[in-house]
Image: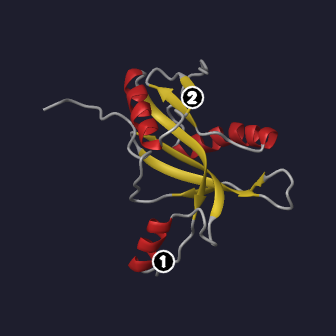
Amino acid sequence: MTATLKQDFTLTLRDFITAVDRNVVKIFERNGVIEPMWHCITASGEHRIEPSPAGDKDLAAILMRVYFVLHNVTRYAFIDEAWTLMLPPDVSDDELREIARRGLADHPGRVEVLMYQVEDESGALSAHRNIIRAGGGKPTLGPLEFFETKESEGRFIGMLPQRGTMQ
């Protein structure tokens, strides 16, 4: 789906997440679920909403990187449901290795979230809303929480094409 809105280049990443979140919350409230999707903005300011390629996440990252080059994407938001784990600052390296080895699927402290990862030439920013599943009814969302970090890693980080001259 492609929208013909023009980008407001003065929007901060925080404002971009907030704007994207308004629409995503409406979809979640209606459907009770969010499928992985990308909100992309091209250099000309065109907004494009694209479903994430199905299947392998590493392949999806490769395909979206190619899409970003082909469509001259300069800003994006990746939106998905995910498991997360809030760890204390004094967590040991052994504990981290064990969590990485086992994953979060069965971890008793995991939290289900609706997550946002955004990026443009100014940097990257993450945010999430907790997904609350109480009493078997329709799930609801907690408040939007932002995470500003100096370093991030993962398959959907650093997705934009490198701009500039080749040496």
Image location (x, y in percent) of residue 58: 42, 42
| Amino acid type indicated by mark 2 | Glu
Q: Cα distance, mark 1 to mark 2?
A: 36 Å
Q: Residue at x 57, y 69 (%)?
A: 86
Residue furthest to the left: 167
Instruction: Determine the secondary structure under disc 1.
Output: loop
- The 10 Å Cα crowd at callout 2, few under 14, some 14 to 19, many 20 or more, is some
Residue furthest to the top: 4
Image location (x, y in percent) of residue 23: 70, 36
- The 10 Å Cα crowd at callout 1, few under 14, some 14 to 19, many 20 or more, is few
In this picture, residue 61 sits left or right of residue 115:
left
Compared with 40, 157 (above or below) is below
Q: Residue at x 56, y 64 (%)?
A: 104
Whether residue 142 is visible to the viewer of this picture, yes or no, is no
Compared with 165, 154 (above or below) is below
| Amino acid type indicated by mark 1 | Pro
Whether residue 25 is visible to the viewer of this picture, yes or no, is yes
